[in-house]
Amino acid sequence: MLDTTTLRTDWTREEAEKIYNQPFMDLLYQAHTVHRTHFDPNQVQRSKLLSIKTGGCAEDCAYCSQSARNGAKLSASKLIEVERVIAEARKAKEGGATRYCMGAAWRSPKDRDMAALEAMIQGVKDLGMETCMTLGMLDDNQVFRLRDAGLDYYNHNIDTSERYYSEIISTRTFADRIDTLNRVREAGMKVCAGGIVGMGEQQMDRIDMLVSLATLEEHPDSVPVNMLIPIADTPLADVEKLDPIEFVRTCALARILMPKSHVRLSAGRTDMTEEMQAMCFFVGANSIFVGDTLLTADNPEEDKDGQLFAKLGIQAMAVGCDASK
């Protein structure tokens, strides 16, 4: 019988594979049981993501339109003004978002940009919102500066399994990602780390990715599960779409392995039916991004999310509430 209360960081691939591949109805039941044990199943957090620096990234991530190396044609922009970030955050809060995420297309931030980033964090926090940033890899000094500015969450996805990683990215290593996550956690900030599925990986890569996160010293506080959005001119533009049931299985395994983490249903929702999203919520996804743009990709419009929430009887989490039990 599945233990729904114990937090474990010693999961094995064999255990996770057995959970993932059990009969689908049993997996749905087990994941929902774990979810209901730790969270109000009828509440979902709404976050907003803003690209604060777009394009021109030195990394070669095969899925990304912002890479300067992989063939995508998105032009580079400068870091946007602090005042604009705060104005956009204010609009996001008025629209019901409780966490504001800011992403920059960098391998890592430069010291000359740190003061502006600190001002963005402080300005958003003054609005009463949680703050999150994704800026690439960080050194110790950068981690401490972001923490001291009040940053709540740092997002740094591991993207895929360690085995498949070099097929997607060659300009950094899987270990580089883990090192940054450890720095963030040791500095006392909350970790947001997940990955992307549907990149041509094998089923075992999806399982291994989640086992890597679930066997960190502490589980990430937030685990984004992204469905690849194929983007023209990138190496993954023509990759075969992942079966929806496989995606739901991935969300379910994330919930079972990391019972108290927020599992974020992230990129790719524009291609998901309402029924598929409902299954993801049932197995434990309890966070989404709102707004019609997710960095440079499309995202469902807010009225569509509102309509779906109404159909399902889901309520948006309030500021300062994580719906945990």
Image (cartoon, rainbow, N blue to C red):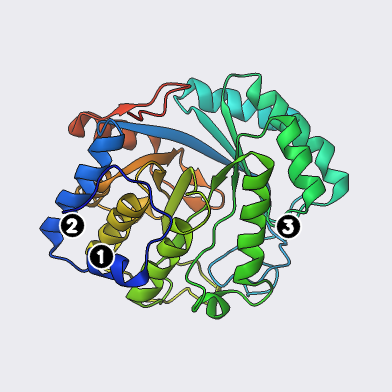
| Nearer to the camera, 279 or 234 | 279
How far apart marks 1 and 3 lie (CA) works out to 40 Å
Of the residues shown, which amino acid type is indicated by label 1?
Answer: Tyr
Q: Which amino acid does label 2 sit on?
A: Leu
In the orientation shown, which residue stands out farthest toward the right?
Answer: 112
Q: Is there CB contact under 8 Å for labels 1 and 2?
A: yes
Q: Nearer the viewer, residue 170 or 230?
A: 170
Give the residue at mark 2: 27
Q: Residues within 10 Å of mark 3 (few under 14, many from 20)?
A: some
* Label 1 Cα neighbours within 10 Å, binned few <14 / some 14-19 / many ≥20: many
Tell me residue 125's x, y (percent): 64, 24
> Which residue has dot 1 on it?
20
Say whether disc 1 or disc 2 marks the residue closer to the N-terminus: 1
Sequence-earlier tag: 1 or 3 = 1
Label 1 and label 2: CA atoms lie apart by 7 Å
> Can residue 267 be seen here?
no
> Which residue is label 3 attached to?
76
Side of 215 where 254 appears, left or right: left
